[in-house]
Amino acid sequence: MAGKVRVAIVGLGFGAEFIPIYQAHPDAEMYAICQRNEANLKKVGDSFGVARRYTNYDELIRDPNVDAVHINSPIPDHAWMSVKALQAGKHVACTVPMGTSVEECRQIVGAQKKSGKTYMMMETVVYSREYLFARDLYDRGTLGRIQFLRGSHQQDMDGWPDYWPGLPPMWYATHCVSPCLAILSDAVAATPASPKPNIALAESVVCHGSGRIREELIKKYNSPFAVETATFKIKGSDVIAEVTRSLFDTARQYRESFDVTGSKVSFEWQQVEGEDPVLHTRGLPEPQIPKRVKVPDFAALLPEPIRKFTGAIHDATHLSFLQGAGHGGSHPHLAHHFLMAVQGKQPAFPDAGTSANWTCVGICAHESAMKGGARVDLPSFA
């Protein structure tokens, strides 16, 4: 499409962090915001100067001036909101996960194909500075041959909204699944790519559940496990990936981490939040093998007006809404890539089919865990 993309943001908790990014982006118009809570809608709208406001999602997507919706609603709303927006002829960006069932993922893929509009799951990890650093090392040959991949996402969700208690850990696994598949795909997350880039997809998964959460947490989803750990095969690759996920009743500081075991150099993201990543270099004396490294922000990949959003909080006026450069400085990269995809300048990454594959690794992993570790083949969304 030509001209600026008129964006509407749905959900104004985490979603409010994207408002100033779209306002500053040269190819976007921050057109509208939407939230059920009218008081908070007014507060956010007044703070950021967004005049067009909606409390009703159906009214929002009927607005002919809205080109694209960026959905940041609770997990149970992701699928139906995405489908409705696509059916209304809107481009869709949606926070993770795509959905909570294979059928929901199929519905979104089908709606995207029928509408011809862009769908992009806004997976933060594959736009974080740490991932882009590891990707750059791989592309330059520093890592050598990738031999193994590991992702881990651990978080204590006690006290979060009522759809979280007892949620199967692997239903929200894209933060640890996505980098394992993205790094073996063409580098569309960092640089312009061919119209049909090669995308690595998961083929099958085996998962085991471990431990047991409190009985009152089990009831809602009938999921007993404190931790779920999965290994999955990647189509056309000899590399296996392992991912671990926990949500309740585990003593662990928050961690999103991603490790690449290479033949020359291996990359390990973090053990404790705030630590610098570690590179392990093969062939050195044992004490010299590990070395901590500083990771750049990769702001140069972005239009100049939004580069500032890869760093610390830049505007104290909006401290009540912003968390700074959350998720490894990924937010401006995500917004920029989505806008480029809407304008036809670059494929969406991940697009609908890729998003469904990444999401279904976790969905099928939980199915495997409930079946005692039986292998589960992933559905095809081709």
Image (cartoon, rainbow, N blue to C red):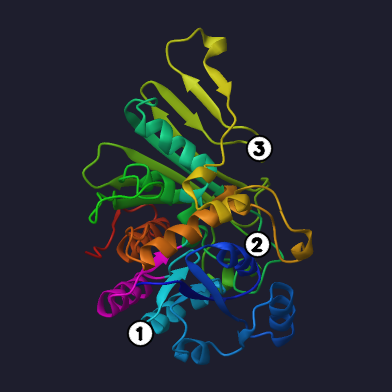
**Residue extending furthest top?**
285
User: Is 63 in the magenta?
Assistant: no
- Residue 308 left/right relative to 85: right
In this view, 260 is above or below 363: above
Quarter in which the N terminus is drawn: bottom left
User: Within 10 angstroms of label 3, few (less than 14), some, or many (20 or more) residues?
Assistant: some
Tell me if residue 113 is in the magenta stretch. yes
Kind of element beneath mark 3? loop
Badge 1 element: helix
Q: Residue at (37%, 80%) from the top-left corner?
A: 86
Which callout, 1 or 2, points at the residue further toward the start of the chain?
1
Q: Quadrant of residue 237?
A: top left
Mark closer to the observer (3, 1):
1
Give the CA distance from mark 1 to mark 2. Answer: 41 Å
Q: Which residue is labeled 1 in the image?
A: 87
Where does label 2 land, which residue? Answer: 214
Residue beneath the point at 45% across and 36% down: 134
Look at label 2 and name its amino acid: Arg
Magenta segment boundaries in residue numbering: 101-121
The amino acid type of the residue labelled 3 equals Val
Q: Is residue 274 visible?
A: yes
Q: Identify residue for label 3.
A: 272
